[in-house]
Image (cartoon, rainbow, N blue to C red):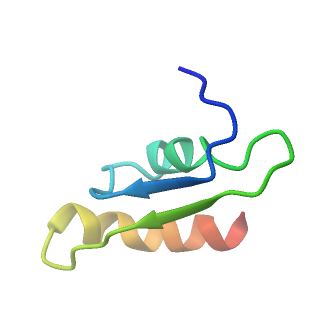
């Protein structure tokens, strides 16, 4: 699906893969437009704790 001019992406559940996360947030800010992503992080969820270090490193890189 292609939805032009998406300004925000909200992640209620983080995916298990940082590649999939980057793909999700890449739906916003396309074609030279700015976009924002908001993600909810649950420190009690094992998968969120596992993905957090990789996401931090990759998002700083972006």
Residue 24: % across, % down: 50, 44
Residue 21: % across, % down: 46, 50
Tell which of 30 and 43 is nearer to you: 30
Q: Splitting the image into 4 quarters, where does residue 2 fall? A: top right
Residue 23: % across, % down: 54, 41
Q: Is residue 33 above or below residue 40?
A: above
Q: Give the residue furthest to the top.
A: 1
Residue in view at x 63 percent, y 47 percent: 28
**For this view, does 15 lie left or right of residue 45?**
right
Tell which of 57 and 5 is nearer to you: 5
Q: Is residue 47 above or below residue 25?
A: below
Q: Splitting the image into 4 quarters, where does residue 10 fall? A: bottom left
Q: Is residue 23 above or below residue 45?
A: above
Residue in view at x 56 percent, y 55 percent: 8
| The C terminus, quarter of image | bottom right
- Counting every numbered tag in the picture gives 0
Residue in view at x 30 percent, y 50 percent: 16
Q: Give the residue furthest to the right.
A: 32
**For this view, does 13 lie left or right of residue 34?**
left
Residue 53: % across, % down: 44, 73
**For this view, does 62 lie left or right of residue 40?**
right
Residue in view at x 30 percent, y 72 percent: 41
Q: Is residue 8 above or below residue 19?
A: below
**For this view, does 49 lie left or right of residue 39?**
left
Q: Give the residue furthest to the bottom.
A: 43
Q: Splitting the image into 4 quarters, where does residue 34 fall? A: bottom right
């Amino acid at each position: 699906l292609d939805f032009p001019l998406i300004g925000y992406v909200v992640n209620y559940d983080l995916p298990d893969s940082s590649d999939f996360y980057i793909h999700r947030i890449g739906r916003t800010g396309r074609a030279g437009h700015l976009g924002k992503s908001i993600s909810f992080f649950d420190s009690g969820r094992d998968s969120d704790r596992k993905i957090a270090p990789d996401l931090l490193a990759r998002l700083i890189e972006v």
